[in-house]
Amino acid sequence: MTPDFPNLSFTLFCLLNTGFVLLVSPFYMSLIKKVKAAAQGRKGPRLLQNYYDLRKLLHREVVYSPTSSGVMRVTPYLNLAVLLLASLFVPVIFIPDAPAGIGNIIVFIYLLAIERFFTALCGLDAGSTFGGMGSSRAMSLSAVIEPTMVISFAALAYVLKTVDLHEMFAITSASAIPVSPTLVLVSISLFIIIIVETGRLPVDNPATHLELTMINEAMILEQSGKNLALIELTHSVKQTLLMAVLINILVPVGLSGGPNMGDLAVSGLLVSGLAFLVKAALLAVVIGLFESSLSKMRLFRLPVFYMMAFFFSALTILMEVFA
Amino acid sequence: MKINTEKEQTMEGKQNTEGMKEKKGMTASEYITGLLRDISKEPQIKNGKNGELYIPLPEKEFQETVPVLDREEFILLGLFCVQDFEGENEEKGENEEGGEKGENEENEEKGGKGGKGEKDKAEAPAFTLFYAFRKRGFSEVFVFLHPVKTEASSIAKTFPSACWYEREIRDGFGLDFPDAFDKRRLFLHEAYPEGFHPLLKSFENGKIRTIENPQENYPFKRLEGEGVYQIPVGPVHAGIIEPGHFRFSVIGEPIFNLEIRMFYKHRGIEKLAEGKPPAACLPIAEAISGDESAANSVAFCTAVEKLAGLRVPERAEYLRAVLLELERIHSHLGDLAGMATDVGFPRITSPFLILREEIFRQNDVLTGSRFLKGAVDIGGMKQDIPDKLLEKLASYLENFEGRFEKAFRTAMSSSSLIDRFSTSGVIKKKLITPLNLTGPIARASGAAYDVRTTHPYGIYGKIPPERKVLSTGDVLSRFEVKAAEVRASRALIRKLVLEIPAGPVLCPPPVAGIRDGFALSMVEAPRGQTLHWVYVKNGLVDRYKVRTASFCNWKAVEHAVLDNIVPDFPLINKSLNLSYAGTDL
């Protein structure tokens, strides 16, 4: 049954969900930095530092390399738009009556792929040494991570018997005992995907200044000013969305409503928002601690790390088949 | 001067045993005489002021000597040029006053013939090339003097480390090496005009007219083929580090060639020292490489003290050793931290950096300088360090030990860190001799060489340091060797503090000022063997040549990265921790 258009719940969702994700994303970047700093015995940046940085960058002029083309100019906007679209797929406060297609997990994966593709193009576009190097690395690694991601999400779809993220969340939040062993297994895969997709240790070191070791950072080295701010924002939105997928699968507590929610109370929304903030903060702490616990892997060993995600997902599917 | 009892045993056995037997009981002087007997009927060996031997070799004999030196496995320590070198004919008599050098008399017969100097002076060749060698089994340095006019023959094919020296000499003096395989400029980049040779005596220090937009590009080695491409990195880097250019040739990620280009920060230190009284050169020596100021100032002062016949009070020798070892500790701590940082493991980094900062503060308390500047003086120390402070240092080091061990254990118990460190950036042992690699990086590749034990100076003859030698030569073994040296230095300092005698720390300056002469001194800086040669003429420094360990060790990085992948380069480079400033004076 397809809901009528335009429906109020969905319009509200578009504004609220997207706005909320956009607003809180930079916070988690800072929080992870703070946790890592604490693990090193440092004070670390303020929790709102990323917002200040974005504001600063938004006021800065953009410098383009003379060899760069339109790709360099379009990508920051395009990527942010793609990620905001993707944010509709991942409800963080309440689950709306969404039109068909919104929430489809395959579309979600490939929206993220579009972002990665354009970032890699951008790295090549400026014609600098490191951009090309970063793009080449990112693309060769994504050839390995993409099937892993597909398998992981397939496992998720298999467990929850749907390919729609909205429905998945509805199922997990509706069931009395949300966490099943297979969901825990697939969550491990999801966690690895967060680490890989956001370029964190042991895959990539977001804090390094060493151009030669970079993957993600190398592709955006030539970005400056406002464009850099948009890229950074896009990156943090991506992180929040992936974190939200994991959270809503594993601990959906607090997520408001099912697909038939008609009347949403403001207080209910506030509680949901707050619940997400706290859960995501806990996850960010876990990510920060995870990053502090190991060194960066050798570039050519990374597929081994991805294979772990692949393995857990494949195991999940097998268990579901023979269960 | 008996054979040094150096235990330069290699990990893979003692290939030199045969050679050692043959030389038993032979002095360095006898040995070299015997070696050169077929070439030169009567080599005129002179004893240097710091135990080194000077052997003059005219062109023809020089040509014949080089293969002999190669066969005998001599190691080229340094090669430098001096313009209008006059030797030290005048003061031959005075030298004997001190009576320190037992062989002066013998030497006199052989070398110091009265009239010789003056006869030579009239037609003296413009330049003298100094080739400093060492030979396993001898604590003395052999310096071959080779007078040349406008060109000299290259020895870089036989002694590969000579390549940079020869290019340096060509830039500095305009002296040509027609048969050299590499004739590119070294420290004078494209912006310097043709015919510009700053080390010539005729060159006045002053403003330089450089070329605005040099058309020529530095010809890097070109490697071509399918899928081969070059990655230029530097000289401006993303981090706050010194400038250097790295030209990688890669196929995908694996590196199959690396060419480095240094000398972006030439300060003209050697020229700056010329014409100044020795005391005024001390601050220059300290500024050679910011984090090796104690090593360089001690090396400079030792050279001047030896040539002037000054005797450093024992307490000052102890204090110098304390500072040298403190410098080694903070340098190595920085390296250990840096290696962990470069594999993205800041949690391991922090404890090392905290300890390093505490050592800097100790330095500050002891000398008033975090980098130990202005502490050493010609003839001893500028100021005494009271026993109370030394005891405080010892008790701090007590506390340091446990925390250092904990940090080291944490690092060594991380499998992901070990995985990155082991097998990365291997330096093969066979490179050590031809490239004269020294310091912890050579000790991590199986060479037991340490200036402190092989050519002891100061207090090290009496209190030798412990050595740790590993044979793997990868980043992990450099990490372990540096950690072991931190421990050894800590133990050494505690021993020094316990045994330090009371007394003055500065010998009275010579009444007639510092005598003319020249001397070579070597010091084991944190990065390895550092060589200083000072030539004082008419009370002023006429030539000051410095060769820090980095100058030789930089070549190691070109070999260490082969077959590694590009993202591992920063780690390998960090594990070598080479000084750009120390290379480019």
Image (tube, grey):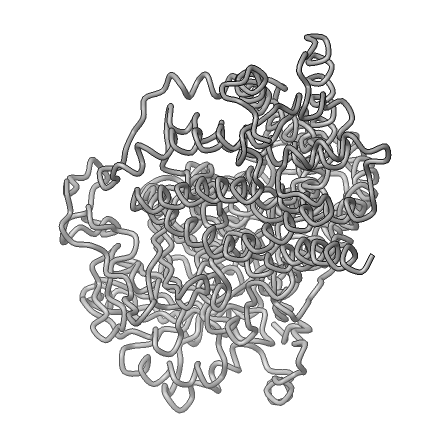
Q: Position of residue B428 (x, y in %)?
A: 55, 72
Counting every numbered tag in the picture gives 0
Q: Position of residue B194 (x, y in %)?
A: 13, 53
Q: Position of residue B442 (x, y in %)?
A: 58, 65
Horizontal side, residue A68 vs residue A194: left or right: left
Horizontal side, residue B534 vs residue B446: left or right: left
* Quadrant of res B476: bottom right
Rendered position, B29 above or below B492? below
Taking the view exactly as shown, the residue that stands out farthest to the front is A1
From the viewer's side, name the closer residue of A15 and B573.
A15
Quarter the N terminus of chain B occupies = bottom right
From the viewer's side, name the closer residue of A219 and B87.
A219
* Quadrant of res B219: bottom left
Horizontal side, residue A322 vs residue B278: left or right: right
Horizontal side, residue B125 vs residue B249: left or right: left
**At x 19% / y 46%, what residue is drawn?**
B191
> Can residue A45 be seen here?
yes
**At x 67% / y 44%, what residue is drawn?**
A190
> Can residue B288 be seen here?
no
From the viewer's side, name the closer residue of B492 and A51.
A51
Rendered position, B513 above or below A254? below
**At x 38% / y 32%, what residue is drawn?**
A78
